[in-house]
Amino acid sequence: MTKKGKIGLLTGGGDCPGINAVIRAVVKKAILDYDLEVIGIEYGYEGVVHNRYRKLRYNDVSGIITLGGTILGTSNTANPYAYATKRGDRLEFEDLSQTAIANIKALELDCLVCVGGDGSLTIANRLSRDGVPIVGVPKTIDNDVRGTDVTFGFDSAVYVATEGIDRVHSTAQSHRRVMIVEVMGRTAGWIALYAGIAGGGDIILIPEIPYDVDLIVERITDRNRNGRRFSIMVVAEGAKPKNGDTVARRIVEGSPEPVRLGGVGFVLGSQIEKLTGMETRTVVLGHLQRGGTPTPFDRVLATRLGTAAVDMAMNGSYGKMVGIQGGSLVEVPLEDVARGPKNIPRDEPLLRAARSVGTCFGDRPVQSGHRF
Ligand code: F6P
């Protein structure tokens, strides 16, 4: 009897809507098209270090396409190359990559499919360089993974954020207030840009364009003069003033990226209230954007990427991530993905479209053909 092929599957980093859809896609495709055994690693890279896994059968993934989160669990702190362990009240970091690699080897996997954002895929790249056969699948609400136009989770987050903006719109108008909606996205402004445009935000602040608070005040005052006695501001958690810094919400000791952003909406709220004399309220959408059922778009995207990842695993396309570029599936070297997060480029057409409908980005745009 020939030995059955076997692949491993792990989900790392922050969860997002669509991860269960990708797990379902990988497991079903692996079983139906290749008769593979699928091993699900639990809690991302933590499971790789501590050897926690279970077999995923067809029925285990049946009916999970609508579920938020990840049935495998995840960790946004575990990194085998700098693994944090609490000793007393101190955190110690150890390189446990050899343990992780030995555990993966012992499972006799043909390939390990790693579903992750740029942090988890950077770790996947290191494991790949260290000889582990790996295929990456991008996920994150932030949409900041290099090599793919879009990640699943993003559309769902934009949907939730847009609904949040829509809901504050009417109350802003009734009370003649400035309403600030702070959205997630780490150092990238994709969620703020898309949800801000979709929700008709008057002012959108993104990390890629440091803001000048005086220009924001100018816009709000102009609107008042024109009889629009309320304003909606959509602010990315990573937004920062010109010559200033981001606002940190907490430090997660032991995390590869310990700073968790958040709170800029409140800082701006008190500044705007003081400078305009208008009542200002701030709403932070936070993890609401990460939970719950994925949108149809994210379910379809996750299914495309998950099934393609299994083909890559079987074709020996190791050390690569499956992505979407111009609507088509592509294979991107993990080395490229690991070059850091994908920010909004200066020539992003959506910036121009938003400015054309009067959106203020807290800067003074250059007038002419190349204002951005
Ligand atoms: O990367 C996804 C994300 O939700 C970011 O938008 C946000 O900055 C971060 O994770 C929050 O992390 P945590 O869940 O650890 O607070």
Image (tube, rainbow, N blue to C red):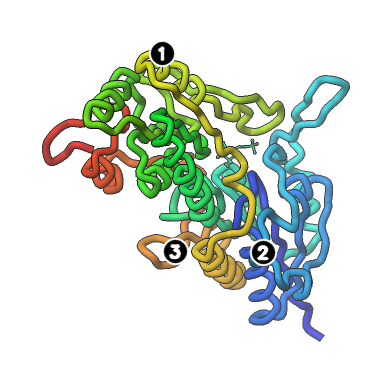
Name the kind of residue labelled 2 in the image: Ile
Distance from the alpha carbon under mark 3 to that under mark 2: 19 Å
First in sequence, mark 3 or 1: give its number: 1
Name the kind of residue labelled 1 in the image: Lys
Instruction: Name the one closer to the observer, 359 or 154.
Output: 359
**Residue in the image at 61% along x and 70% along y:** 310
Instruction: Name the one closer to the observer, 103 or 274.
Output: 274
Name the kind of residue labelled 3 in the image: Val
Q: Quadrant of the C terminus?
A: top left
Ligand 1 falls in quadrant = top right
**Residue in the image at 44% along x and 22% along y:** 279
> How many numbered callouts?
3
First in sequence, mark 3 or 2: give its number: 2
The answer as to whether callout 2 falls within 8 Å of ligand 1 is no
**Residue in the image at 42% along x and 35% along y:** 174
Q: Is 209 on the left-hand or right-hand side of 246?
A: left
Q: Which mark is residue 274?
A: 1
Q: Callout 3 environment at 10 Å: few (<14), some (14 to 19), or many (20+)?
A: some
Q: Which residue is mark 3?
A: 330
Could you say whether the residue bearing mark 2 is in a helix, strand or loop?
helix
Q: Which residue is mark 2?
A: 23
Could you say whether the residue bearing mark 3 is in a helix, strand or loop?
strand
Indicate which label's residue lies in the foreground, 3 or 2.
2
Instruction: Name the one closer to the observer, 53 or 3.
Output: 53
Q: Callout 1 environment at 10 Å: few (<14), some (14 to 19), or many (20+)?
A: few
First in sequence, mark 1 or 2: give its number: 2
**Residue 199 in the image, given as x and y percentages of width and height:** 40, 46
Q: Is 193 on the left-hand or right-hand side of 287?
A: left
**Residue 278 in the image, given as x and y percentages of width and height:** 39, 21
Q: Quadrant of the N terminus?
A: bottom right
